[in-house]
Amino acid sequence: MNKKVLVLSGSPRKNGNSEILCDQFINGASEEGHSVEKIFLGDKKINYCIACGSCQRNNGVCIHKDDMAEILEKMIEADVIVMASPVYFYTMDAQVKTLIDRTFARYTEIKNKDFYIIITAADEGKELLERTIEGFRGFMDCLPGAKEKGIIYGTGAWDKGDIKGSKAMDEAYTMGKLV
């Protein structure tokens, strides 16, 4: 069955390690015939949620007139969502956290999705990155029927391109094929 795969690349750095792993995942999923779209969050205008509650009173319509409504609609329509972030101070970056917060307008409609998480970090140890993963899991716990399908740990990647040649490259490609 062909699936709609939405890849949310959260790095502020184009062609950085997180995005390189996203592209590997995309290669695998595309080869299997899935429909894949990548959104580079750094190219999008996503304002912070200001907790005004307007979206809850207005059928999910946010007061901000930015790119989030379009992204949120794509999240609702997707079968599979890949969320990628570099790890900064043992948590996801601001771009991804802002996106998650802004799903509040319609988060209950992001249901029955398979989720893959891609994280990259200079740190070599996966155990220290569990704090970051727990942040993603907290988000998924709020979504009806969300299923965590896989995590790609791109460790030991500080400088742009450090991830190339790592085992995370093969893992991202393989997970993409298994969507």
Image (cartoon, helix red, strand yellow):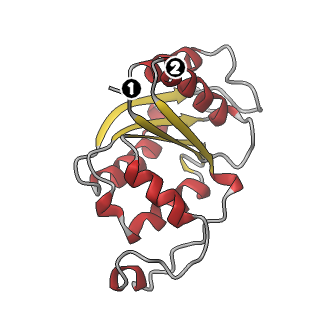
Residue sitting at 63 percent across and 35 percent down?
18
Residue under pointer 2: 28
SS state under label 2: helix
Residue sitting at 22 percent across and 47 percent down?
145
Q: Is residue 52 left or right of residue 41?
A: left
Are discs 2 and 1 less than 8 Å apart at CB?
yes
Q: Name the kind of residue labelled 2 in the image.
A: Gly
Position of the C terminus, as image quadrant, is top left
Q: Nearer the viewer, residue 60 or 168?
A: 60
Label ID, residue 135: none
Q: Nearer the viewer, residue 84 or 66?
A: 66
Q: Name the kind of residue labelled 1 in the image.
A: Val
Q: Nearer the viewer, residue 125 or 20?
A: 20
Farthest left residue in view: 145
Q: Nearer the viewer, residue 144 or 129?
A: 144
Residue under pointer 1: 179
| Camera sees residue 125 | no
SS state under label 1: loop
Residue 89 x, y percent position in the rendering:
59, 49
Residue sitting at 73 percent across and 24 percent down?
162
Q: Earlier in the sequence, mark 2 or mark 1?
A: 2
Residue 134 x, y percent position in the rendering:
38, 46
Q: Residues within 10 Å of mark 1 (few under 14, many from 20)?
A: many
Residue 169 x, y percent position in the rendering:
59, 19
Q: Quadrant of residue 143?
A: bottom left
Q: Residues within 10 Å of mark 2 (few under 14, many from 20)?
A: many
Q: Is residue 177 above or below residue 57?
A: above
| Camera sees residue 92 | yes
Give the CA separation, mark 2 to mark 1: 9 Å
Residue sitting at 66 percent across and 29 percent down?
20
